[in-house]
Image (cartoon, coloured by chain):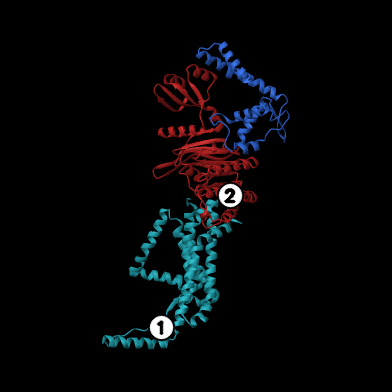
Chain colours: A blue, B red, C cyan
Amino acid sequence: MPIPFDESRPIFQQIAERIEDDILNGTYAEEDQIISTTQFSRIFQINPATIVKGFGLLVNEDIIYKKRGLGMYVAVGAKEKIMAKRRERFYSDLVVKLLEEAEKLGMTTEDVIEMIKREKGEQRK
Amino acid sequence: MSSVLQVKHANKSYGRTDAVDSLSLELEELKIYGLLGRNGAGKTTLLNMVTGGVFPDGGEIAVHGTLLKKGDVPAQICYIREKNFYPGNARVRDVLQMAAAFHPDWDAKFASKLLGTFKLNPRKKMRQLSRGMESMVGNLIGLASRSPLTIFDEPVLGLDVLMRERFYRTLLEDYAEHPRTVLLSTHLIDEIATVVEKVFIMESGSILMEEEVEQIRERAHLVSGLGAALDTFVQGKRVIHGERYGNAGMAIVYGKLTKEDHKAAESQGLAVEGVPLQKFFAYLIEEGQTDE
Amino acid sequence: MNKMKVQLQVSWLRMKLAIWILVAAIAVSVIANFTINMALGNDPQQDAQDVAAAVGELRELTGNNDLSIEVPSEMENVNVSSANMLLVLLPLLAIILPLKTFRPMMNFGDSRRRYFAGLLGVYAVSAVLLALVNSLWWPFEQNVIRTHSQTYNLIEVFGWEQFGFIGAFVYQTVFYFFVLALFNLLFSGLKSPISWVIWTVLIAAIPIGTSIASLRVHVADFFLALLFNDSLVSAIGLNLGLSLVFVAGAWLFTRRRTF
């Protein structure tokens, strides 16, 4: 199995993101058990300590929680928490950057909105 | 955490060349470590000292808390050499049985299962094996020994990608069920980067860097942009490698970058990216070499 | 499988080829001798007549009547006992084992101490086995083989038969162990300068010991005491005592021997 992770960024963060993605797209519902450290380690060929660290990030944010002796489970309200977090990041990482770039290119905010509307309109067809 | 292996200022020279030069390192319990370095960096000499094969000229080595005296071979250790010394006319099956006698935690069932996993024919004689299969016999012994400290020297030599991954996956799988300390010494760092928790990077007989792999991923940055801006930015930071082309340039910077650092870079038109580990190690070793 | 069994197996794997070659060589020579003796008819008188006739012919041909051929009293071809030929194994064992089994055993994770003890065990068993084979072969050789072929056996050459079956067996065992211990010493520390000194001394001792007359007496005395000793007890003492010195020397090499 080739490693589906970006080798130039910490892998534990990418592991957390992957689990979040799976919660967002419905692979895991609330109170579902998520993949175990051992399975994850074997499938993606990653040191278990790294995975534990990745899961730890999610535990700290109350997105998953540990049932003693059973494994990790998706917390109630996890999806909302992830969405809220991602919206925040959407703003800081994408919107702000988008507008900065637009400014460099001499585009006004209206131009950008116009472009977005055009894209959306085309998609509707 | 108790230490499984402790090396303090170990020295070893052959003639006038220092194979190992005042080297110190410590392995903690139940972790997987990588010992990375080019061929000839002194890795095998270090491992031979640690396992009692050769004796250090100076310094101390303690295995499982016991100081290694000259001539002693440490217990509770399984060392899989790069070049094995199993009799060539012994069959794979016999070699496994023989190895079992020296490892109290040997799991015979696991060993016979691994024969299948690694596609080894137990009836073949050792001298009939390809280099890759020879490596796999050693790897099998290392895994089945379940030794509290298992050392593999160049475990994937002669193996194709598929078998390399099969070995690392099996190692991780078994490690999850039977945690122990593992040291993987190799110059082939392709697949090892996600397998190990911590690496020691060795060059010219000493440790250049000792760090958790995830830490390195967090701290290794490739900064590129205009030369002047770059110079200001890297000031006071650890630069592993730098290059100039025209009035632009790039630098591999090692260290945690703060929010302010990122902002400063952005305002100066500098691009900050991560560095793939293999690349980073290559730069590090290259620089470590020119330092001499 | 325990560690000692591993050592036995590794030793066997390393010795296998040499043992087969030796056994094959002995078998071939035995068969060849047997065939030749059969073909010759094995009749000393006939042989003497043949020689006389041949000399007569030569005299006629050359016209030289002084020509003669010295004929030994026993004309048959004389062989080393087959069981004695097996003794080539002694140096072979003590050369091949220290050279070829140390690293495999260390590679498995063996300690130097256990390896060395195991090696001594292999030597002791080998000495006993070879002595036993030769002791058992000896009556067979005297009663069966000598009816058609003349052979030499160490047991009579060194006069060990005077000590009886058990005594000859014991003398052989200690002497074989002495040989093993000597070769083992020489081949245990080839990387060590001390070993080179021992080699030099030994090689130099041969011409010096035989060429200087005053020394020659002592050298001869030494070999007499070692091999032709009329006292079994003193022979055992000398052989084992020297073996002990060699073993101690080999251990000093082995305990510091690097991989």
* Pointer 2 and pointer 1 on the same chain: no
Q: Are marks 2 and 1 in contact (CB under 8 Å)?
A: no
Quarter residue B174 falls in: top right
* Relative image position of residue B18 (x, y in whole percent): 42, 41
Q: Is residue C64 left or right of residue B77?
A: left
B125 over B20 or under it: above or below? below
Pick the residue in front: C48 or C116: C48
Quarter residue A1 falls in: top right
Circle 2 SS class: loop
B186 over C236 or under it: above or below? above
C238 over A78 or under it: above or below? below
* Relative image position of residue A93 (x, y in whole percent): 58, 19
Q: Residues within 10 Å of mark 1 (few under 14, many from 20)?
A: some
Q: Residues within 10 Å of mark 2 (few under 14, many from 20)?
A: few
* Relative image position of residue C185 (x, y in whole percent): 46, 59
Circle 1 SS class: loop
Q: Is residue C27 left or right of residue B104?
A: left
Query: Farthest residue in the front direction?
Result: A125
Provide the chain ID for the residue under circle 2.
B
Which numbered tag is attached to residue B119? Answer: 2
Query: Farthest residue in the left direction?
Result: C63
Pick the residue in front: A121 or B11: A121
C189 over B267 or under it: above or below? below
* Relative image position of residue C66 (x, y in whole percent): 28, 87
Q: Name the residue that disc number 1 marks.
A: C75
Q: Nearer the viewer, mark 2 or mark 1?
A: 2
